[in-house]
Amino acid sequence: MSASDLIEHLEAEHRAMLELVQQFRAADFERSIAGSDWTALDVFAHLAHGSSEAVKALADLARGQPISMGIDREHAGKPGRGMPLARIMEEFRRSHRSLVDALKRVPSGSLRAETAQRTADGASMNAAWVVAHVIEHYAAHYEALSGALDTPD
């Protein structure tokens, strides 16, 4: 998969999240998501953080450094609490744009370059893996968020 293919998939997942959020009422952002004590606000703050961590990981890879495992860790506590909705959503959009821009700067020859860092299943933690991880992250949280819309007040 090329960088443009990854960008296309990343953009599609991000767009799906933004389309989903258009269906939310104010109360939907504050309601706990089934099976969790996180709200939609927390999820969007978490996704913004994940994209920002992916940008840092791509920069580390460009410098030949090991990537931070921060993109695999959950936030402690509730990341969206106390932050206004507009700020969280702007950070969600900004971090996404930063990730797309960072991916565009990855030389095509190094997108899938082997790295010394490996995932638990042995895959190389390269630029393509970092972006695929974010795409999967969006998709996983999309399901939880869409379920929140089905929950009555």
Image (cartoon, rainbow, N blue to C red):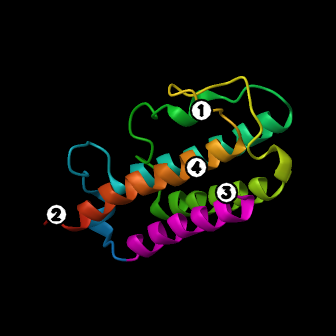
Q: Residues within 10 Å of mark 2 (few under 14, many from 20)?
A: few
Residue at the limit of the structure toward the left, as seen here? 152
Q: Earlier in the sequence, mark 1 or mark 4?
A: 1
Q: Which mark is residue 132?
A: 4
Q: Which residue is the site of mark 2?
A: 151
Evaluate if marks 3 and 4 touch, with contact meaning CB atoms under 8 Å apart.
no
Q: Residue at x 51, y 64 (%)?
A: 13
Q: Is residue 2 magenta?
A: yes
- Which numbered mark, 1 or 4, is in the foreground of this view? 1
* Residue 14 place in picture, x, y as percent: 53, 65
- What is the span of residues highlighted in magenta in the rendered image? 1-22
Q: Residue at x 69, y 54 (%)?
A: 99
* Residue 10 place in picture, x, y as percent: 59, 61
Q: Residues within 10 Å of mark 3 (few under 14, many from 20)?
A: few
Q: Main secondary structure of the magenta part?
A: helix
Q: Earlier in the sequence, mark 3 or mark 4?
A: 3
Q: Residue at x 49, y 31 (%)?
A: 73
The amino acid type, in three-letter code, at marker 1 is: Ala
Q: Which mark is residue 123?
A: 1
